[in-house]
Amino acid sequence: METSQEVTVKDMVTADYRTAFIFERYAIDFCCGGKKTLDAACAEAGVDPRAVRQDLAMLSLGTILQPEQFGDWPVDALVEHIVQKHHAYVRRMSPVLIAHTTKIASVHGKNHPELNAIASHVAFVTEELTRHMQKEELLLFPYMRSLAAADREHRTIAPPPFVSIRNPIRMMEQEHVVAGDAFKYVRGASLGYTVPDDGCTTYRVTYSELDEFERDLHQHVHLENNILFPKAIDLEEKLTRKE
Ligand SMILES: [Fe+2]
Ligand SMILES: [Fe+2]
C-alpha cells in the first residue's frame, strides 16, 4: 500500500477498501474530508502516523479479511449494493436511534445535557438522510441504471431533465457533508461515544449504535462520492460523446 506524501487518504480507500476499517479505528475521516495526505489526516485526528502506517502495512500481509473490490463493479451493481446494504440499514436504524437517544436524554439529560443536543441532531440527520436517499432512489439512481443499460446495449441516451448528472451529484455531495457534519458533532459531544460511569445499559447500547451508524455512513458516502459518482460521470460523458 502506497503511503507516500502525494497520495490522499481518499485515494488509499479507493485503491483498497480494507483501509477504511483502519482509518475508522483511528477516527480518520476518509470520505468528506479525505482529500488529505496520510500525515495531514493523522495530525488532524491526533494520532501517530507511524502506528497507522504499520497497520496499513499489515494489509499487504493478508491479515485482514478480503472485502469486495468495489472499484471494479459496474455502476448498476454499485447502485444495487448501496440501496440494499446502506439505504436499508439507515431506514432500519433511524427509528431505533431516535427512540434510544430520546430515551437516554429524558433519563440522563439533567446530568448530561449534551444528550438533548445529541437527540435533536439524530432526529435532524435521520430525517435529512431519509429525504436524501429518496432523491437518490427516485431521481439519480434510475438514471444511473439507464446509463449502465445503454452502455451495455451500445445505445445513446436521452438528455435527463437535470441536463447533466453532475448537477444532482453536486447536490448529493453537499447533503453528504451536512450529514457528516451532524455526526461529527454527535461524536464530539459524546467524547467519541464514551459512556459515563453512571450510564445505563440503554446509554451503552445507544452509543454503540451511533458509533456503528456513523461508520456505516462513512462507508456509504465513500462508495457514492469516491467510486459510484465519478464512474457515472465518466459513463455519461462517454455516452454523450457517441451522439
Ligand atoms: Fe445513498
Ligand atoms: Fe448519498
Image: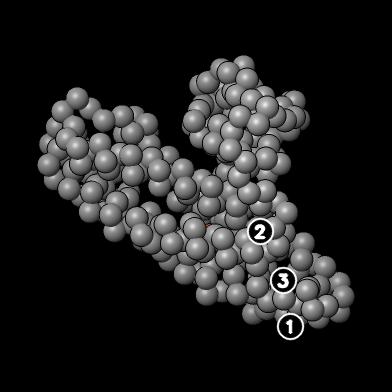
Q: Nearer the viewer, mark 2 or mark 3?
A: 3
Whether the residue carrying mark 2 lies under 8 Å from ligand 2 is answered with: no
The answer to whether any part of residue 39 appears in the image is no
Q: Is residue 103 left or right of residue 206?
A: left
Numbered badge on residue 62: none
Q: Position of residue 155 (x, y in %)?
A: 81, 81
Q: Position of residue 52 (x, y in %)?
A: 59, 23
Q: Are marks 2 and 3 in contact (CB under 8 Å)?
A: no
Q: Are marks 1 and 2 in contact (CB under 8 Å)?
A: no
Q: What crowding class fits label 1: few (fewer than 14 Cα within 10 Å), some (14-19), or many (20 or more)?
A: few
Numbered badge on residue 148: 3
Quarter of image, res 204:
top left
Residue of label 2: 229
Q: Is residue 103 left or right of residue 239?
A: left
Amino acid identity at mark 2 = Phe
Q: Residue drawn at (22%, 54%), measured in percent from left and top?
A: 99
The disc, 2 or 3, on the residue closer to the chain's N-terminal end is: 3
The disc, 1 or 3, on the residue closer to the chain's N-terminal end is: 3
Q: Quadrant of the C terminus?
A: bottom right
Q: Position of residue 152 (x, y in %)?
A: 78, 74
Amino acid identity at mark 3 = Ala
Element under disc 1 = loop
Q: Residue drawn at (69%, 58%), measured in percent from left and top?
A: 73
Residue of label 1: 158
Q: Are marks 1 and 3 in contact (CB under 8 Å)?
A: no
Cα–Cα span, label 2 and label 3: 13 Å
Element under disc 2 = helix
